[in-house]
Image: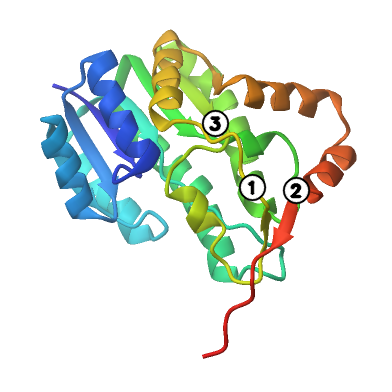
Amino acid sequence: MSIAIITGASSGIGEEFAKQLKELSGIDAFWFVARRRERMEKIAETLGVEANIICADLTESEGIEAVRRELEEKKPEVAFLVNAAGFGKFGGFDEIDEGNVAKMIDLNDKALVLITHMVIPYMKKGGRIIELGSGSCFTPLPYFNVYAASKAFVLHYTKALNFELKKYGIRATCFCPGWVDTEFLPLSKSVPGATVPKEMKPLLKTQKVVRGCVKASIKGKTMYVTNWYTKLQHLLFKLVPDCLLSKAWLGMLTKNPPKEEE
């Protein structure tokens, strides 16, 4: 039986990938990987799919090793791997603590790479890998610098990996959405006193962008950039110097209120 493994499966983009993969690819057996067991169990029940629930924090080595143990024990045939787990915080280098900085790198890059490498041996010709990039990956973004840089890593990693996998008939796609209407956005702006965007528009619908990404992955596309606005940004980032783009971005930022004294 072919399965799809989805990290970050308990909500938002990860949850939507389960819905779209069931509909578009016929996958009805999943491995859901995230921290919130009850949410994943509810999703499996709602979709009516067989699901192996792996409750794991992928910012910790124990969480990554939990996935490895399941693979070694069950030896599944993996048709899709979707690394949708992601973490981001707005704020400057002096506004975000090192713990949040480390989590962004550990989850967005380290966990993504390690999960990908351990899953590939269980994939056959026709297998598909979707790595969660971002519309933020195309240019340096002050006050979102670690997150944007972590997603630039994902983009280059996925493009290079795709070349390596061609001889095996496996393809990797980097998913580069703009601002998607999920719980990620309010959480990313939650640091008191941090520098954040004044507004985040246009907000994209999860169903539409994920559906487009699954179709692009099935076709073997290396990168999927959502909607005309993000595609225009991608083009401008190629043509306009980084210094000008950064100045334009700075004009869209403001300060969160400081933490109230208790």
Residue 130 lies left or right of residue 225; in this view the side is left
Residues under numbered marks 2 and 1 in contact, where contact means CB atoms less than 8 Å apart = yes
Alpha carbon separation for disc pair 3 and 2? 19 Å
Question: Residue at point 30% right, 53% down?
Answer: 65
Helix, strand or loop at mark 3: loop
Mark 3: few, some, or many residues within 10 Å (few <14, many ≥20)?
many
Alpha carbon separation for disc pair 2 and 1? 8 Å
Q: Is residue 33 above or below residue 220?
A: below
In-front residue for pair 193/133: 193
Q: Amino acid at mark 2?
A: Met
**Residue linked to disc 2:** 252
Residues under numbered marks 3 and 2 in contact, where contact means CB atoms less than 8 Å apart = no
Q: Is residue 26 above or below residue 207?
A: above
Res 206 → quadrant: top left
Mark 1: few, some, or many residues within 10 Å (few <14, many ≥20)?
few
**Residue linked to disc 1:** 199
**Residue linked to disc 3:** 177
Res 234 → quadrant: top right
Q: Is residue 41 visible?
A: yes
Alpha carbon separation for disc pair 1 and 3? 17 Å
Residues under numbered marks 1 and 3 in contact, where contact means CB atoms less than 8 Å apart = no
Question: Residue at point 54% right, 31% down?
Answer: 177
Q: Amino acid at mark 1?
A: Glu
Q: Amino acid at mark 3?
A: Pro
In the rendered image, residue 257, in percent from the top left (x then y), is placed at 64, 71
